[in-house]
Image (cartoon, rainbow, N blue to C red):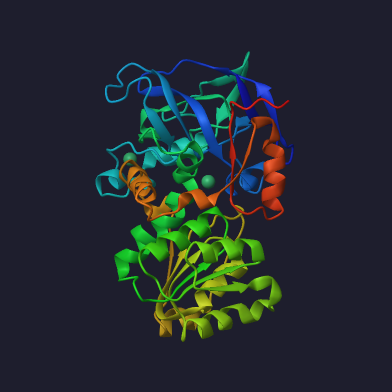
Amino acid sequence: MRAAVLRGAGAGVEVEDVDLDAPHPGEVRVRVEAAGVCHTELHYISGDIPCPLPVVLGHEGVGVVEEVGAGVTDMVSGARVVFTWRPRCGECEYCVTGRPVMCVYGRVQASSGGLMDGTSRLHRGNEGIHHFLGVSCFAERAVVSRRAVVPIADDIPAAVAAVVGCAVVTGVGAVLNVAAQHGSIAGHPLLVVGAGGVGLSAVMGAHLLGAAPLVAVDVSADKLQLARRLGATDVVDASALPEAEVAGTVRELTRGGAEVAVEAVGSASTLRQAFEALKPGGRVIAVGLSSAKTEASVPLNQLVQQQKHLVGSLYGSSNPAVDLPRLLELYRTGQLPLGQLVGETYPLEDLGTAYDKLRGGAVGRAVIDPSLVPA
Ligand SMILES: [Zn+2]
Ligand SMILES: [Zn+2]
């Protein structure tokens, strides 16, 4: 099958003819309908964050189950599923205490380059090839753990379903699952830093819950325009301001600071801006990943005297089996306009172009359709 392979940090991604083994017990094979182009993979492509190589990339997507492995009793061929790169074992300390994103085995899978048992179904002849975060959906097909797919309805457009499994659950989840657990959002000032797929999703989630004012910060006027369409009441173009003035501008727009700030960029400077833009007692929810070496600092006395909170949230701190269908139901009923998040569609062979455009500030989430064959 055709699959997008990364062979070395900085080496670029090439489509190769890769072998895919049949599913082992507890696994399923999925024909990929669409896969989202996520900013996080740029860190792996450049080597900022290491992963086992060579690897078939792709970690958010949707497809149709073609084959189920032994012991899979709750899934049939023909089922439509979204991939989730945070499968849960259901038995570890984190799973049984309601925090499946932190699942011990899910974390092992993410770093091993294999599936839940640590082994891979991908190879090219005798050469072993790794899975990316247990998914590898920049390919015509993917074999994954049953726990790494969530059934969804047949009528959701593929591009919308594809982006739910990473960008949307991360951004909307930060608001619904983290911010809203610490106090009401309606009528309170909320800041979103970064208007890529995750940040725009956070804007949608905050708009859904009635945050006001709802301020978005980015360095792209086009992305900020989309943020406005999705519910931001005010936008700040940080490219037009000295860095030191961004937080003060947000505090003015919010008449004293944001109650909640979702930091979706993943840099030390934007994290600090988000922290300084808070009102006393406010909370930064950091969701943007950075290079493995990045460290961030915040003013210590603001942390203490103003009782500010700084928390991390991975994958929307979600319960994917419940939250992915829930988010798609909010889409179906018109409450989350996820279609507006979707950008251009490309064949697998144009993944490099899609990443170049992402680096260059493309608006909206690009989607790969592996059934497209370039002319
Ligand atoms: Zn992602
Ligand atoms: Zn677990």
Which one is in front, 101 or 195?
195
Give residue 309's quadrant in the image.
bottom left
At a point 48% along the width and 36% down the height, the residue shown is 158
- Give coordinates of residue 101: x percent, y percent: 38, 47
- Give coordinates of residue 291: x percent, y percent: 62, 53
Please tell me whether residue 308 is drawn above or below residue 19 in the rendered image. Answer: below
At a point 63% along the width and 13% down the height, the residue shown is 125
Please tell me whether residue 133 is drawn above or below residue 210 in the rendered image. Answer: above
Give residue 347's quadrant in the image.
top right
- Give coordinates of residue 322: x percent, y percent: 30, 44
The quarter in which the C terminus is drawn is top right
Q: Residue 220, can we see it?
A: no
Most extreme residue toward the top is: 125
Most extreme residue toward the left is: 96
Give residue 194's quadrant in the image.
bottom right
Q: Is 160 on the left or on the right of 291, as rendered?
A: left
At a point 31% along the width and 68% down the height, the residue shown is 182
The quarter in which the N terminus is drawn is top right
Q: Is 320 on the left or on the right of 365, as rendered?
A: left
- Give coordinates of residue 236: x percent, y percent: 60, 74
